[in-house]
Amino acid sequence: MYEEITKKIKITVKPEFLEEHSDPEEKRFIWAYHIKIENVGNETVQLLSRSWKITDSLGRVQEVTGSGVVGEKPFISPGSSFEYTSGTPLKTPSGFMMGFYKMEKKNGGSFNVSIPPFSLDSPHETGSTN
C-alpha cells in the first residue's frame, strides 16, 4: 500500500496485478488500483480532475488527464472519504504510476493533491522490480 497526505487530503493506493485479464505472450499486462481519498482536514472539498503519468519498464510515459474520477466529481466532507477502483494496461510486465487530483474548496480556492508514486509489478517480470 502507498500513502501520501497533501493539504490534509490523504491518498491511499493499493495496486493489484490482474493475471486473468493479462496475456504475457501478447505483451498485455493489466492492473487494477484501488484509491481511497480521505479528508483529514476541516473543510469540504470537491475532486474536479485527475492527471496521471504511467511509465512502463522501458521508460515510455503515457499521460492521462480528465474530469473527475470514474465518472464522478465527489464532494468529500471533513472526516469522510471517497473510494474507487480503476485500472491500466501496460505492454511491459512492470512500471509505475503517479499523479495528482485537482481539488476545490467550498470557498472556491483550488489546489493539487499528490497521488503517491506506486509500483506495478507482475510475476512475469524477469529482472528487478520497481
Image (cartoon, rainbow, N blue to C red):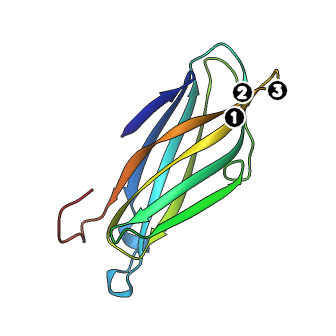
Q: Residue at x 55, y 54 (%)?
A: 52
Residue 82, horizontal then vertical, whole percent: 62, 35
Residue that lies at the very extreme toward the top in this rendered image: 42
Q: Counting residues from the N terminus, which is met first, the one under dot 1 or under dot 2?
A: 2
- Kindly identify which residue carries mark 1: 103
Residue that lies at the very extreme toward the right in this rendered image: 107
- Of the residues shown, which amino acid type is indicated by label 1? Met
Q: CA distance from mark 2 to mark 3?
A: 9 Å
Quarter occupied by residue 80: top right
Relative to 49, residue 20 above or below: below
Quarter occupied by residue 79: top right
- Kindly identify which residue carries mark 2: 45
Q: CA distance from mark 1 to mark 3?
A: 10 Å
**For mark 3, does the 10 Å Cα neighbourhood hold few (<14), some (14 to 19), or many (20 or more) residues?**
few
Look at discs 1 and 2 and give the one toward the viewer. 1
- Kindly identify which residue carries mark 3: 108
Residue 4, horizontal then vertical, whole percent: 45, 32
Residue 72, horizontal then vertical, whole percent: 74, 46
110 vs 46, nearest the viewer: 110
Q: CA distance from mark 1 to mark 2?
A: 6 Å
Q: Residue at x 67, y 53 (%)?
A: 70
Residue 22, horizontal then vertical, whole percent: 40, 75
- Asked whether the beta carbons under mark 1 and mark 3 sit within 8 Å of each other, the answer is no
Q: Counting residues from the N terminus, which is met first, the one under dot 1 or under dot 3?
A: 1
Which quarter shows the C terminus? bottom left
